[in-house]
Structures are given as C-alpha cells and as structure tokens.
Image (spheres, rainbow, N blue to C red):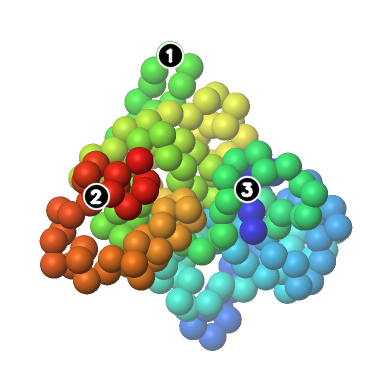
Amino acid sequence: MFTGIIEEIGELVRLGRKGNGLSLTIKASKVLSELKAGDSIAVNGVCLTVVKAEKDSFVVEVSPETLIRSNLGKLRIGEGVNLERALKLGDRLGGHQVTGHIDGVGRIVALGREGDFLTITAQAPPEVMKYIVTKGSIALDGISLTIASCWEDRFQISVVPYTAKMTTLGQKSIGSAVNLEADLIGKYIERFMDAQWGQQLKDRPGLIDQEFLAEHGFL
C-alpha cells in the first residue's frame, strides 16, 4: 500500500531485457534507506519488487503484463521516475490509499497555468473515467491528486508549485502517457452495488438517481 506522496524523483540509468519483460536500474538516494531485495516500491505509481539494492541505485523487474498496462515500457535512459516506498504500519497517510495496480494509461491533452498553479487535462479510458468524480482522488504516475473538473472522457487537475517541482509533473508535455489508478473506495462501492442490485442496474442503466439512493439508505 502507498499514499501517493512522492519521496523523490529517481533516474533510469540502465534498461535491459528480461525475457519478454524489462529490468530497470534506477538511481536514487532517499528511498534507498533501509531498502532491500524483496521490498515493494512504486515506480511511476506501479508497485514493483526490488530484486537488488545497491549504494546509489536499485533494480526492479517489470513483467510483460505490466508493460502493457502501464507507461513503463516507454521509459528511456536518463528519464525521471516518481518513487515511493511502501507504507509502514504507523506512517501518516498523507495522500490517499494507493495500491500500485494501474487501471489504465491516460494521455495529457492540455497544459495550462492559473497563477503559480499548473493545470493538467488528461484523457482517460472508460474503465478509469467511470470512477472519476469532481473533488475525488486519483493517482497519476503515482501522485495523489484531487480532481478539479471532469467530463465524459477526460479530467483536469490543478498542481501546486511544490508538487510540480518535486515530481515529474513539471516535466510533462502534451501527449505524455501517464499511469492512472482510480480511488479504491469507488471500486469497492461498485462491487457492493453490483452484488446487491446487479441485474436491476443492467436492466435499467439510469436507475441510480437521488430517489434510488434515498430508498436504499444512502441519503
């Protein structure tokens, strides 16, 4: 489990083939404290297992399935990556609950400025957009962010200067691929509602309204 609070930006210094997967060597400093083989670490929001930890770098391996479902296969030598070690019992949950299991890859379609704040509009696949709500949480390349606005196939976030500087968000450009993980709470709610009213929801897609929610004790 992670929080979406990035600890540092690492640098990809070596990339090698591992069967149909990849081996990534990432230069870092802060996250190396107490890091050892077998530990979990989030790289651009993807939960990976450390296979080797050295004085100034660590190595992770990426499976073929993860390459398909994330942007890790597009990384190049010298590129920065967001890093976060797994949450320890007793740590503060500064962002929101992030599993490191990517739901889909989005694409940045617009960048803007509102004073000192960076605004990013990202297009997302339907399997992610169904969980997107205004003021809800999303992990974008592992960063816990609040959704400012959302539309049918895209959403917008507003990034404070500190976050833009301390993560890779400040280096993004239009067309950049970004890993997306929707809020876990929405997935649990979907599963619960499907178990309770699955057939009704299939028969009547517009069933969920204020009357339905009030009738079933949600309002």
Can you give x and y, in whole percent of width and height, for residue 36 in the image? Answer: 82, 66
Whole-Å distance between the Cαs marked 2 and 1?
A: 42 Å
Specify whether residue 168 is in view. yes
Whole-Å distance between the Cαs marked 3 and 1?
A: 27 Å
Q: Amino acid at mark 3?
A: Thr
In the rendered view, tell whether residue 182 sits above or below residue 122.
Answer: below
Which residue carries the number 3 mark? Answer: 3
For the point 37% across and 31% down, the residue is: 148
Q: Which is nearer the N-term, disc 3 or disc 1?
A: 3
- In this rendering, would 36 be left or right of 167? right
User: Which residue appears farthest toward the top when viewing the image?
Assistant: 115
Q: Which is nearer the N-term, disc 2 or disc 1?
A: 1
Which residue carries the number 2 mark? Answer: 212
Label 2 or label 3, whichever lies nearer to me, is 2
- The image quadrant where one finds the C terminus is top left
How many numbered callouts? 3
